[in-house]
Image (cartoon, rainbow, N blue to C red):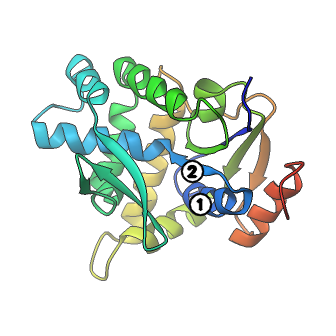
Amino acid sequence: MRSRPVITIDGPSGAGKTTVSIRLAEAAGMIRLDTGAMYRAVALASRSKGVPWDDPARLGGVARTLALSFRTVAGVPRVFLSGEDVSDALRTPEISMGASAVSAHGPVREALVEKQREMAREGGVVLEGRDTGTVVFPDAEAKFFLDAAAAVRARRRFLEVSPPGGQPFEEVLRDVLRRDVQDSTRVNSPLRMADGAVYIDTTTMTVDEVVGEMLRRLPGIPR
């Protein structure tokens, strides 16, 4: 029996999970766990070790030995891999696609799900990713699924990761659509809405509106 609730937020790339989970965790006085960053970290670490993204056994080893930590620096959530701040490196288009590739492998998912469950064992945690409500914590006290039109999600991703002269919007949109297919059709833990999850279409909503809607559905949490 957990002393505090577990809240899960799932959804496709660009649906707003990262920003919303940060704000919701702050409002609810909880810890935020970015499970997507963990898969990105496996992709980044395996690339630096020369491990191909299509080698399940070796990728599983990378995942099991991942030295990952989440910290807040100057009020901003950051991700550290073996003591190095890799927050920006994890958000590149290449590593985003790599995360989708490595997450399709059973040994990787098994290793990271075990880590995620241990990190959130006592509750009081907001988890965001693609299978937090379906696989990691199907018994979570509150589950949400964020979604948005593909073009809107691509625009958000474009503004987030593309510097001037960087990846064209059309290419970002193709990447978003390609990742949607990869994530929703993989054999291991495909992206889908969890049983009992609240669906929120963020296409025309502000961050404040999304967080407000979520807080209204969490009894006992200050508005």
Between 219 and 188, the residue placed more toward the observer is: 219
Q: Is residue 115 above or below residue 56?
A: below
Residue annotated with mark 2: 32
Q: Is residue 97 above or below residue 1?
A: below
For badge 2, the amino acid type reads Arg
Q: Quadrant of residue 58?
A: top left
Between 14 and 47, the residue placed more toward the observer is: 47
Between 42 and 26, the residue placed more toward the observer is: 26
Q: Mark 2: few, some, or many residues within 10 Å (few <14, many ≥20)?
A: many
Residue annotated with mark 1: 22
The reply to whether residue 9 is visible in this rendering is no
Quick check: marks 2 and 1 in contact, CB under 8 Å?
Answer: yes
Q: Residues under labels 2 and 1: Cα distance?
A: 7 Å
Residue depicted at 46% across the width and 60% down the height: 173
Q: Which of the numbered marks, if any, corresponds to residue 153?
A: none
Residue depicted at 60% across the width and 34% down the height: 132
In this rendering, position of residue 216 left or right of residue 67? right
Q: Quadrant of the C terminus?
A: bottom right
